[in-house]
Each structure stands twice: as C-alpha cells, then as structure tokens.
Image: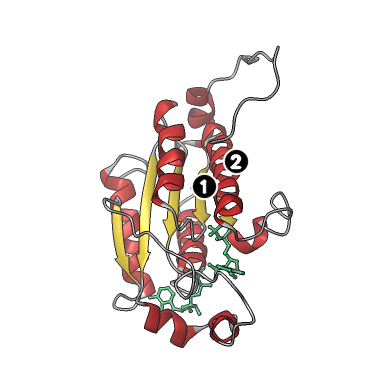
C-alpha cells in the first residue's frame, strides 16, 4: 500500500461536478477491469467493446498493460512489488477517467486479488462503479494462441516470472462477469458486457 509522502497538500475542489460532466456526455463513467492470463483476450475484448460503445455514442478509453508499461509505468518490471505498484497507479488513472465521465477499459493481467480489491475499494469509496471482468481461458488455450510468442520464450527460460508458467495468477472469487474466452465467441463476450452495463444502469437500456 503506497503511503502519502507529501505533507501540507490540500484537495482543490472545482465548480464542475462529476454529475455535471455526466450530463454533458449523456452517460456516466465506470471502470471495467479486465483480468486474466496473457493471451486470454483482455485487449481483444476491450478493443471490440470500445468500438461498439463508440457506435452508441459512449466515450470509452482503453488502458492496456503493454501500452502503459511503455509510458507512465516504464520504470516497473514484473516482480510482485512492481506488479502491485503497476496496478495501484492504473487504478488511480482509471479513477480519474471515471471522474471525467469516461468508461475506462482497463486490461491488465493484475494477477493478485488484493491489488484488484484495492482498486475496487478506491472506486467504491468515491461512489464509482467498478466492474471486474474475469477473462477466463485455460493456460493450454492461451499458450496455444501465444499471440506475441511470449509463452514459447517463457517455456524456453528466456522470460522469467511469466504469469501462469512460473508466476502466480489468482482468479477472481466473485467477479461481476465471468467470461470464458476459450468457449465463447468475441461477439458473445461483448454482448454479455453490454447487457451487464445496461442492467446496472451504466448505459441506457
Ligand atoms: N513476466 C511476465 N509476466 C506476464 N506478462 C509479461 C511478462 N513479461 C512481459 N509481459 C508482457 O507484459 C504484459 C503484462 O503486463 P501487465 O501490466 O498487464 O501485467 S501485471 O498486471 O502487472 O501483472 C503482457 O501482456 P498481455 O499478454 O496483454 O497480458 C505481456 O505482453
Ligand atoms: N473469444 C475470444 N475472445 C478474445 N480473444 C480471442 C477469442 N478467440 C480467439 N481470441 C484470440 O486470442 C488472442 C488474445 O490476445 P490478447 O487480446 O492480446 O490477450 P491479452 O490482452 O489477454 O494478452 C487474440 O489473438 C485473439 O484474436
């Protein structure tokens, strides 16, 4: 858990509220937190969903492991501590997007349940929707896909601490949505997410 280091800092309140921004955009923000093994389909589902939401006039923005690790988190690796800090920072960034009224589509392996729960708490304490989506896929199927050739490298010992091979993945106990990307089609997955967003009043029915 990161501690507050700076002292004498004060929150500065503006005049425009989250409710005001939701009115401007015609929808409120929320974080959709995709978690799953490398190659499970987190990015693929988020890209497809972003397109479908865009067609409906809903502003979403993708935060993606590989992309974020080339920017704001370029100083982090894959030790347990660095993964925790990676998720903490992304959680804060996602919260900013939700405050701005955007649907944040966050695709990170996020292997530790405690890290994901911290992001959930951060959102829920601020009255924001946090939807955990488990992109479940057997290791065998993810490894057979191996879209970036990383499993092959991990099996050859060229990558250490690779999630699912020699590093842990803690599956969510009670995700808001449990997808099975090795059994469902991409369309079925996206339809299930849209149905949940409607059910929870995040997008119009
Ligand atoms: N050791 C190790 N373990 C897991 N993944 C690795 C590793 N090294 C590199 N990669 C690549 O980094 C992507 C995962 O980054 P994340 O930020 O999502 O990871 S984490 O949430 O901090 O665990 C992951 O992307 P995805 O395949 O999209 O999940 C990989 O491309
Ligand atoms: N039903 C499905 N849902 C998501 N991805 C799928 C599905 N079926 C096959 N795939 C493929 O699996 C791969 C998933 O890769 P990617 O989205 O990069 O995963 P992740 O972001 O979890 O690492 C892609 O090549 C994608 O086309």
Name the quadrant where ligand 1 sits: bottom right
Q: In this view, does 4 lie above or below 154?
A: above
Dot 2 or dot 1: first in sequence order is 2
Answer with left or right where residue 196 lies relative to residue 19. left
Q: Is mark 2 within 8 Å of ligand 1?
A: no
Nearer to us in this view, 115 or 184: 115
Q: State which quadrant residue 149 falls in.
A: bottom right
- In the rendering, at what x and y percent does residue 205 appear? 29, 46
Q: In this view, does 104 lie above or below 29?
A: below
> Badge 1 local density, few (<14 within 10 Å), some, or many (20+)?
many
Q: Residue at x 45, y 58 (%)?
A: 111
Please identify, in this view, whether the residue under mark 2 or under mark 1 is nearer the observer.
Answer: 2
Q: Residue at x 37, y 50 (%)?
A: 132
Q: Considering the numbered disc 1 on the image, is that residue within a helix, a strand or a loop?
A: strand
Q: In this view, does 29 lie above or below 21?
A: below
| Alpha carbon distance from label 2 to label 1 | 9 Å
Q: How is the image coloured?
A: secondary structure
Q: Considering the numbered disc 2 on the image, is that residue within a helix, a strand or a loop?
A: helix
Q: Residue at x 70, y 12 (%)?
A: 8
- In the rendering, at what x and y percent does residue 44 appear? 49, 69
Q: In this view, does 11 lie above or below 55?
A: above
Q: Is mark 1 within 8 Å of ligand 1?
A: no
Answer with left or right where residue 84 lies relative to residue 129. right
Q: Name the residue under label 1.
A: 104
- In the rendering, at what x and y percent does residue 85 appear? 59, 46
Q: Mark 2 points at which residue?
A: 93
Q: Which residue is drawn at 34% across and 57% down?
A: 193
Nearer to us in this view, 82 or 174: 82
CB under 8 Å between discs 2 and 1: yes
Q: Which mark is residue 44?
A: none
- In the rendering, at what x and y percent does residue 35 appear? 43, 59
């Amino acid at each position: 858990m990161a501690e507050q280091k700076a002292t004498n800092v004060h929150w500065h309140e503006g005049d425009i509220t989250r409710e005001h921004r939701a009115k401007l955009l015609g929808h409120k923000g929320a974080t959709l937190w995709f978690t799953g093994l490398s190659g499970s389909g987190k990015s693929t589902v988020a890209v497809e969903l972003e397109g479908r939401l865009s067609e409906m006039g809903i502003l979403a923005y993708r935060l993606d492991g590989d992309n974020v690790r080339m920017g704001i988190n370029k100083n982090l690796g894959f030790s347990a501590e660095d993964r925790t800090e990676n998720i903490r920072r992304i959680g804060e960034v996602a919260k900013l997007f939700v405050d701005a009224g955007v649907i944040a589509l966050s695709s990170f392996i996020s292997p530790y349940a405690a890290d994901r729960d911290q992001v959930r708490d951060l959102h829920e304490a601020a009255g924001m929707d946090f939807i955990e989506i488990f992109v479940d896929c057997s290791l065998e199927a993810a490894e057979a896909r191996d879209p970036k050739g990383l499993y092959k490298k991990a099996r050859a010992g060229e990558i250490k601490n690779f999630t699912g091979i020699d590093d842990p993945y803690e599956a969510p106990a009670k995700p808001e949505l449990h997808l099975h990307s090795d059994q469902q089609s991409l369309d079925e997955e996206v339809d299930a997410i849209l149905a949940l967003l409607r059910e929870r009043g995040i997008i119009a029915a």
